[in-house]
Amino acid sequence: MRGDADASFTLPDDAATARAGAALATALGGGMVVTLSGDLGAGKTTLVRAALRARGIAGAIKSPSYTLVEHYRTSSLYFYHLDFYRFADSGEWETAGLAECFRDDAVCMIEWPERVASLLPAADLALTLALPSHGEGRVLTAHASTEEGRRCVAAIAQALTPAAAAR
Ligand SMILES: Nc1ncnc2c1ncn2[C@@H]1O[C@H](COP(=O)(O)OP(=O)(O)O)[C@@H](O)[C@H]1O
Ligand SMILES: [Mg+2]
């Protein structure tokens, strides 16, 4: 099926961001690419960490902002958590072997995708976290481009109260 869908959700506190991540985790499958946009401190790493925890990853889950990529493995899937905040030049893409992250048996969750836009495969799901214009918490916007992405949005919607359905 084609066609894109957007939805947005209010995340009043940390716990809500974690619920969104855990809900996302239930719908992740091999080959999926999820991008996370938003300023520093918007909650991208918090959401990914919750998703990884929900998939049974124990131990430290570090932000990959210095390493570009952190990888995790479960019995059924690999998870790559990428962060391009410090990405300097496209040569790093090659030297770090990042193309190898994008495989049928792996899920890629990518912070700062804008910095490598031309190098990334198309995302199933583009998430954006932002501070609301007034009030506390965060606003999560989800843009699904594939059926798999739409399943993620549905899982998040089920776990959260939608703020508004944008179109
Ligand atoms: N919904 C929320 N409301 C308020 N604070 C939040 C929310 N979600 C996350 N936070 C906080 O915002 C900060 C986000 O940090 P982090 O996840 O590292 O951001 P990013 O990876 O986008 O730079 C953390 O201190 C986290 O506790
Ligand atoms: Mg981060």
Image (cartoon, rainbow, N blue to C red):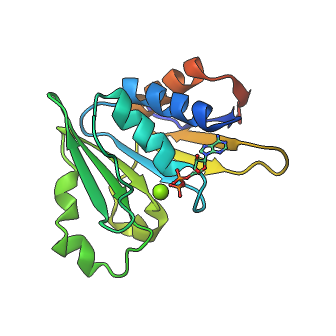
In the image, farthest residue toward the front: 59
Residue 131 image point, x, y percent: 71, 51
Q: Pick the residue in front: 61 or 55.
A: 61
Number of numbered tags placed on the structure image: 0
Question: Which residue corresponds to the image point at 55% horizontal and 41% vertical from the top-left?
Answer: 143
Q: Pick the residue in front: 94 or 53.
A: 53
Is 52 displayed left or right of 13 in the figure? Answer: left
Dividing the image into 4 quarters, which one contains the C terminus? top right
Dividing the image into 4 quarters, which one contains the N terminus? top left
Specify the quadrant of the image occupied by residue 49: top left
Q: Pick the residue in front: 8 or 159.
A: 159
Question: Which residue corresponds to the image point at 45% horizontal and 28% vertical from the top-left?
Answer: 22
Is 75 displayed left or right of 17 in the figure? Answer: left
Vertical order, 139 against 7 (above or below): below
Vertical order, 155 against 66 (above or below): above
Question: Which residue corresponds to the image point at 67% horizontal and 36% vertical from the top-left?
Answer: 13
Specify the quadrant of the image occupied by residue 82: bottom left
Vertical order, 29 against 106 (above or below): above
Specify the quadrant of the image occupied by residue 147: top left
Is 125 displayed left or right of 134 in the figure? Answer: left
In the image, farthest residue toward the right: 134
Vertical order, 83 against 22 (above or below): below
Q: Pick the residue in front: 138 or 120.
A: 138
Residue 146 visible? The answer is no
Residue 5 image point, x, y percent: 57, 35
Residue 91 visible? The answer is yes
